[in-house]
Each structure stands twice: as structure tokens, then as C-alpha cells.
Amino acid sequence: MKPKEIRELSVEELNKKLREMRDELLNLNVRKGTSQVENTGRIRQLRRDIARFETIKAQK
């Protein structure tokens, strides 16, 4: 998502999306440990998205 789209979300929606992304990141990291991840770039993308959401959430 683009920052403009993220800013339009409510705090509750931000928290819900953050929870979903963190769950996905945890699952990817577990699967990475067992060499079952096909797209390792997704882990990096999720970390950056989580940071972006946290920054905008702190601004609100």
C-alpha cells in the first residue's frame, strides 16, 4: 500500500493490518527455517510494510 492509502485508514484498521502482517511474517520466518519459502523477498517487503504502518500509526 502507498503511504497515502495507509493514512486514510482508521487506527483500528491499522492495528488489524499490522496483526495480519506480523502473523504472515512469523509464518514465513518459520517456513524459511525449514527451507520451504519460495519467495524470500516477501520477508523483506513485509518488514518494510510493517515499519511503514508503525510510522504512520505513531504520527496519528
Image (cartoon, grey):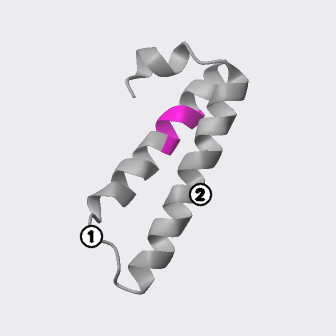
60 relative to 57, above or below = above
Mark 2 closeness class: few <14, some 14–19, many ≥20 residues within 10 Å: few
Q: Residue at x 38, y 59 (%)?
A: 43
Identify the disc placed on residue 7.
Answer: none
CA gap, disc 2 to disc 1?
Answer: 18 Å
Q: Read off the residue under disc 2.
A: 23
Q: Secondary structure at mark 1?
A: loop
Position in image of residue 10 (x %, y %): 66, 18
Q: Is 28 left or right of 14, judged from the image as shown?
A: left
Q: Residue at x 29, y 65 (%)?
A: 40
Q: Quadrant of residue 49?
A: top left
Position in image of residue 13 (x %, y %): 65, 27
Q: Secondary structure at mark 2?
A: helix
Range of residues picked out in magenta: 50-54
Residue sitting farthest toward the bottom = 34
Q: Read off the residue under disc 1.
A: 38
41 relative to 53, above or below = below
Indicate the amino acid at tag 1: Glu
Mark 1 closeness class: few <14, some 14–19, many ≥20 residues within 10 Å: few
Q: Residue at x 59, y 18 (%)?
A: 9
36 relative to 25, above or below = below
